[in-house]
Amino acid sequence: MHLIVAVGLAGFTLLNGASNYAVAPTEVTTQYSVIGENSFVGGAMPSNEQSWLSDEVYRATLASKMILLAKCESGNNPLAVNWHDNGSPSYGLFQWKEASWIYQIRKFGYLEDTENKELLNYIYDRDWQERITLATLQETNGFRHWTNCWKIIN
């Protein structure tokens, strides 16, 4: 039996199941999206159950930290704006600055055919904020974008 983690910024739920499916973040924990067999957000599914479980535990821990991070940064409000954040505003659920937002989207290869100015249209989108933040947090020292709140939640 495998452990399936349903993740959402409202919380996360551990579900027992016999499936090899990963779940994608959604807004409500009672709903989850199946990404597909043998795939995870951000990587391939490990081949044995022990490493699979370890990966799921890691993802559940990261999801819980993302929940706390969103609450700390924006009060879990995807439309939040901090107009006075070290000289330039920060936007959205995880309070991205415009330059960092564009840089991270480009670095991860998302929306490649979209002009930089148009990328800012996604800055208030909860799903895009979750996707870019998740990818960033999985990098070495990815938390550096949220130093103050990261200290609070850890």
Image: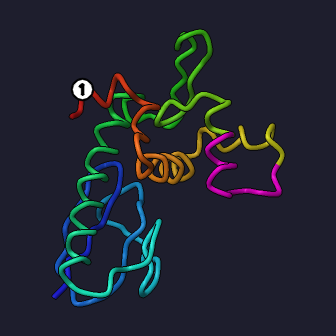
Residue shown at the point (57%, 50%) measured from the top left: 128
Percent of width and height locating residue 126: 52, 47
Residue 15 on the magenta span: no
For the C terminus, which image quadrant? top left
- Tell me: 145 left or right of 7: right
Residue at x 32% of width, y 60% of height: 7
Res. 30 image quadrant: bottom left
Name the residue at 21% across, 69% down: 54
- Secondary element at tag 1: helix
Q: How is the image coloured?
A: rainbow
Vertical comparison of 121 with 25: above or below:
above
The local crowd at label 1, few if under 14, some if 14 to 19, many if 20 or more residues have their Cα within 10 Å, is few
Is 70 drawn above or below residue 21 in the view shown?
above
Name the residue type under label 1.
Ile
- Of residues 62 and 11, the one drawn nearer to the viewer in this rendering: 62
Side of 121 where 108 appears, left or right: left
On the image, the x and y values in percent for residue 77 come to 44, 34
Report the label total.
Answer: 1
Seen as rendered, the residue at the extreme front is 140
The structure residue drawn at horizontal position 37% and vertical position 69%, both measured from the top left corner, is: 32
Q: Magenta stretch containing residue 111, yes or no?
A: yes
Q: Is residue 21 above or below residue 33?
A: below
User: Which quarter of the rendered picture does the N terminus lie within?
Assistant: bottom left
Report x, y in % for residue 9. 35, 49
Q: Which residues are magenta?
A: 103-114
Picture quadrant of residue 97:
top right
**Quarter holding residue 43:** bottom left
Residue placed under numbered mark 1 in the picture: 152
| Viewer-proximal residue among 24 and 154 | 154
